[in-house]
Image: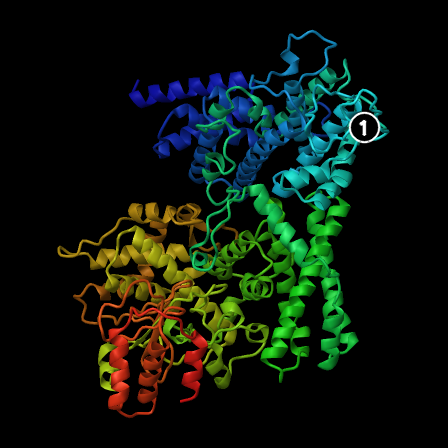
């Protein structure tokens, strides 16, 4: 017998033993053994084989349906508890999540199953956060909790008919909470809702302890108690006081939301528990649960009920948090009662993090993160939204209707083009919420919030349109259904994310409203502009991440309207859509993008006169939501026309050239797309230690060529897939003895994984061949895609960068990335008429050939010297001796302190020329 055969027999024996311990049926057992042996033969499995067996067993059980004795129902999970499976295999939850992801890729599991794992992972993250909130809140209400490990009452040897202890009440409260939470199948991982359910549970248990006059349990210093609670003559009221508002006040809750969840979500489930006999006590008053003789029965009943739930669905047992060995079973180094933002959540990556990483393009404009917990982050977002919409009704405001009347928009048009479509979309949204088992009151409340936000933002955009383009009829925008639907969908996404509705996470909202990503992304920036002062940092960061997700992949799907637009004309190069914009033309706090109006984005083609005005704002190419920087250096570098032409490489166009005619929406899209791409490229090059600027330009030229001339490479694929291939091929052809720049795909993928919000699915599952007829599309890893597809399309072009090819390629200039302040080492060009640049002043100028002005620090003479030089250059005449003397003295006194006028002074002086 060979060694491999002997090992295989040992593995089969181990699997048989595992199946026996778990009492798995023969179908699931055979499925688990076959899948494990197949993966083991084709892949090298690092670590303990038993850990991989746990993955095979879990997949086999979760994909097998077990019929019940009645024959009318089925049980998922093969009646195997995930917690018990992991305990037998000696693997922690975090280790399991890491390995199951790899297993799913190796076994080519379906998207549906991957979504289940993502749901389970996120649910665990939410449960971890909420348990850490639960313990301190419980100790705020009740006293006497000790550190001794929790033990199930079913195994307790305590004498019966004894009042419950605080520790037993702690276990009871958590078990009751997770049993009720299990009734909300689709929304059990929605952070805000489940937090408010937890507060309702604590309020319910407090009411029972209060009505039982359990002075020994309730903390006498709790704020929710009556003042005379400890007096001997205290008379119990007919109804216990509600402590929801008190808990929300001291523990980061939203009183109205929590009260709604208590009344319309918590109470119906509790009544059902009484009706089914799961809980025993006073069913009318919902009290008496803690009475002597009933408490142990109720706790045992809850444990049995939850045990049945866990076995039927195969999910992890949330009672794991109560155990003595909780930290070992979870996989954390510290106790689960530790810091809120913990290793538990941070291990999960972008799909499960309670506080996701900031996207690369958002790091330039987002402020510093306040030290908020996941719960307080979510409640802060909702509270700010609620405050913003405090006096808003779910209908057009009086000011909006008056504006429409003044602009000739009739009430009939308002009703048919705004109100009626909005009502239809609200119904679609309510149906989506209904699928998640939300209560009718919750659905109504959230639909009203979305609708109020929609009308509030819509009015702001309408007023901005009227201010910027008063000559254009507002009826054009009012009758544009795609624009309005995009706005409503974006408002829905804002509300869903604020509530942490993981079950309706992006891009579910696009499917709900049957909206294309290509239209949706156009509205994101306008929404943030309208509500920038009322959206939390987390919401702005989320919208930025959504915009990135749209640009990188969602707009490139086969059914995207983008392909129809591309058929109408050639794809513009980055130099054709990039014009340096002047930071001297500021508006609205620097929040406007080059295409700043809804009419530009959704309606009109670009006319020549519009192009001249298109990029006047101070936002870099494609950049949205940027907070401007106040420290700039103004730099004068006079060049003759001959010098300017000689400095530009042959065949290149500078970033300051006039763009070709194009559709407005395509210009906006490719400005954003190219700037996102260059930010991603720079980040990857930095992580790969590729610092040579010429090499970066080669990579950029290769990437740009693939987008412009091999556009089919992007169809149903991801920007990062094409970027990583471009980096690999350019490093390979540029490598030589004097310039060792070659990088392997392993290096590239390793560095890619380190990027914020990166997903290894991007390089593990790449489209190789589209589906034809009945055959499914062929997919493979990034290396397979490179060898089978990318090389065939790009090899000839890439060889032009070897330096040995007779047809060498001119290099494209690097566009300014979103969030980048500079488009060149000289800074950002202010005007087309002369060589004047601005950039942040991070260090003193190196020489005396520059004039520098620092806001609130430099004297007025420094600004006067700059204006003198600019005025003389614009006038086409040589500076007088006096003017030269002013400039010279200004150069010698760069660091002179003082107070000067700010940017408006420079604008005024230039306008006076």
- Residue drawn at point x = 45 percent, y = 54 percent: 359
Please tell me whether residue 274 is drawn above or below residue 905 in the rendered image: above
In this figure, which colouring scheme has been used for the structure? rainbow
Q: Which of 207 and 302 is in front in this view?
A: 207
Q: Residue furthest front?
A: 898
Q: Which of 239 and 59 is in front in this view?
A: 239
Q: Residue under circle 1?
A: 286
Q: Which of 260 and 12 is in front in this view?
A: 260
User: Where is residue 135, by image quadrant?
Assistant: top right
Please tell me whether residue 76 is drawn above or below residue 804 in the rendered image: above
- Left/right of residue 737 with respect to residue 755 in the rendered view: left
10 Å neighbourhood of mark 1: few (<14), some, or many (≥20)? some
User: Where is residue 704, by image quadrant?
Assistant: bottom left
User: Where is residue 910, by image quadrant?
Assistant: bottom left
Q: Is residue 566 visible?
A: no
Residue 515 lies, in percent from the top left, at 61, 61
Kindly state the secondary structure of the residue where label 1 is placed.
loop
**Quadrant location, the N terminus:** top left
Please tell me whether residue 194 is drawn above or below residue 9 in the rendered image: below
Residue 211 lies, in percent from the top left, at 80, 24
């Amino acid at each position: 017998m060979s060694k491999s055969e002997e090992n295989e027999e040992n593995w089969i024996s181990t699997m048989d033993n595992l199946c026996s311990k778990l009492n798995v049926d023969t179908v699931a057992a055979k499925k688990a053994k076959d899948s494990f042996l197949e993966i083991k033969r084709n892949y090298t499995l690092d670590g303990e084989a038993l850990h991989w067996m746990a993955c095979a067993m879990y997949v086999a059980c979760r994909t097998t349906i077990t019929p019940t004795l009645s024959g009318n129902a089925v049980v998922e999970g093969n009646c195997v508890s995930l917690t018990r499976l992991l305990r037998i295999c000696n693997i922690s939850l975090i280790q399991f999540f890491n390995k199951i992801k790899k297993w799913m890729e190796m076994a080519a599991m379906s998207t549906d199953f991957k979504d289940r794992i993502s749901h389970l992972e996120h649910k665990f993250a939410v449960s971890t956060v909420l348990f850490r909130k639960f313990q301190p809140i419980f100790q705020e209400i009740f006293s006497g909790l000790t550190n001794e490990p929790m033990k199930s009452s079913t195994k307790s040897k305590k004498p019966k008919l004894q009042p419950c202890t605080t520790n037993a009440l702690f276990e009871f409260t958590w078990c009751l909470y997770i049993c009720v939470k299990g009734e909300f199948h689709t929304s059990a991982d929605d952070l805000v809702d489940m937090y408010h359910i937890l507060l309702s549970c604590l309020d319910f248990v407090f009411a029972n302890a209060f009505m039982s006059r359990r002075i020994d349990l309730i903390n006498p210093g709790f704020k929710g108690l009556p003042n005379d609670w400890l007096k001997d003559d205290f008379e119990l009221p007919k109804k216990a006081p509600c402590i929801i508002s008190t808990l929300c006040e001291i523990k980061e809750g939203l009183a109205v939301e929590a009260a709604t969840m208590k009344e319309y979500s918590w109470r119906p489930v509790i009544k059902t528990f009484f009706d089914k006999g799961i809980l025993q006590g006073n069913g009318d008053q919902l009290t008496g649960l803690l009475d002597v003789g009933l408490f142990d029965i109720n706790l045992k009943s809850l444990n049995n009920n939850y045990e049945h739930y866990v076995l039927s669905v195969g999910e992890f047992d949330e009672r794991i948090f109560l155990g003595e060995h909780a930290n070992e079973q979870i996989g954390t180094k510290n106790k689960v009662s530790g810091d809120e933002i913990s290793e538990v959540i941070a291990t999960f990556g972008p799909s499960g993090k309670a506080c996701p990483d900031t996207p690369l393009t958002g790091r330039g404009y987002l402020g510093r993160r306040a030290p908020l917990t996941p719960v307080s982050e979510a409640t802060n977002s909702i509270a700010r939204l609620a405050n913003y919409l405090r006096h808003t009704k779910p209908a057009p405001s009086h000011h909006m209707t008056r504006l429409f009347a003044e602009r000739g928009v009739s009430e009939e048009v308002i009703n048919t083009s705004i109100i009626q479509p909005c009502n239809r979309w609200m119904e679609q949204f309510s149906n989506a919420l209904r699928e998640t088992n939300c209560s009718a009151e919750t659905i109504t409340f959230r639909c009203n919030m979305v609708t109020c936000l929609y009308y509030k933002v819509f009015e702001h955009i309408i007023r901005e349109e009227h201010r910027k383009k008063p000559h254009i009829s507002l009826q054009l925008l009012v009758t544009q259904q795609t624009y309005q639907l995009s706005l409503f969908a974006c408002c829905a996404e804002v509300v869903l994310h604020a509530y942490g509705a993981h079950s309706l996470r992006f891009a579910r909202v696009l499917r709900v409203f049957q909206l294309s990503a290509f239209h949706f992304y156009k509205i994101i920036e306008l929404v943030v502009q309208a509500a920038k002062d009322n959206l939390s940092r987390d919401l702005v960061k989320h919208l930025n991440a959504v915009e990135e997700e749209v640009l990188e992949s969602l707009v490139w799907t086969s059914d995207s309207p983008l392909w129809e637009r591309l058929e109408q004309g050639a794809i513009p190069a980055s130099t054709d859509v990039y014009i340096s914009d002047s930071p001297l033309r500021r508006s609205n706090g620097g929040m406007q993008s080059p295409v700043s109006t809804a009419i530009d984005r959704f309606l009109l083609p670009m006319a020549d006169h519009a192009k001249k005005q298109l990029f006047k704002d101070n936002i870099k190419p494609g950049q949205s939501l940027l907070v401007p920087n106040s420290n700039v250096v103004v730099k004068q570098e006079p060049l003759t026309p001959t010098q300017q032409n000689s400095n530009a490489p042959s065949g290149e166009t500078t970033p300051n050239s006039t763009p070709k005619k194009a559709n407005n929406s395509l210009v906006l899209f490719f400005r954003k797309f190219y700037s996102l791409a260059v930010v991603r490229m720079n980040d990857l090059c930095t992580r790969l230690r590729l610092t040579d600027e010429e090499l970066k330009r080669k990579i950029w030229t290769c990437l740009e060529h693939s987008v412009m001339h091999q556009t089919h490479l992007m169809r149903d694929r991801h920007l990062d897939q094409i970027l990583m291939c471009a980096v690999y091929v350019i490093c390979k052809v540029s490598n030589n003895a004097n310039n060792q720049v070659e990088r392997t795909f392993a290096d590239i993928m390793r560095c890619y994984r380190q990027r914020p919000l990166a997903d290894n699915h991007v390089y593990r599952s790449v489209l190789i061949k589209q589906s034809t007829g009945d055959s499914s599309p062929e997919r493979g890893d990034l290396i397979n895609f490179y060898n089978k597809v990318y090389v065939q399309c790009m090899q000839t072009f890439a060889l032009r960068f070897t330096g040995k090819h007779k047809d060498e390629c001119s290099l494209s200039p690097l566009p300014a990335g979103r969030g980048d302040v500079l488009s060149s080492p000289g800074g950002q060009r202010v005007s087309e008429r002369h060589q004047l640049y601005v950039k942040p002043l991070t260090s003193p100028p190196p020489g005396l050939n520059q004039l520098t002005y620092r806001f609130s620090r430099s004297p007025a003479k420094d600004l006067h010297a700059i204006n003198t030089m600019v005025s003389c250059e614009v006038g086409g005449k040589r500076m007088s001796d006096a003017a030269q003397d002013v400039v010279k003295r200004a150069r010698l006194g760069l660091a002179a302190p003082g107070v000067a006028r700010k940017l408006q002074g420079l604008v005024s002086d230039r306008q006076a020329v």
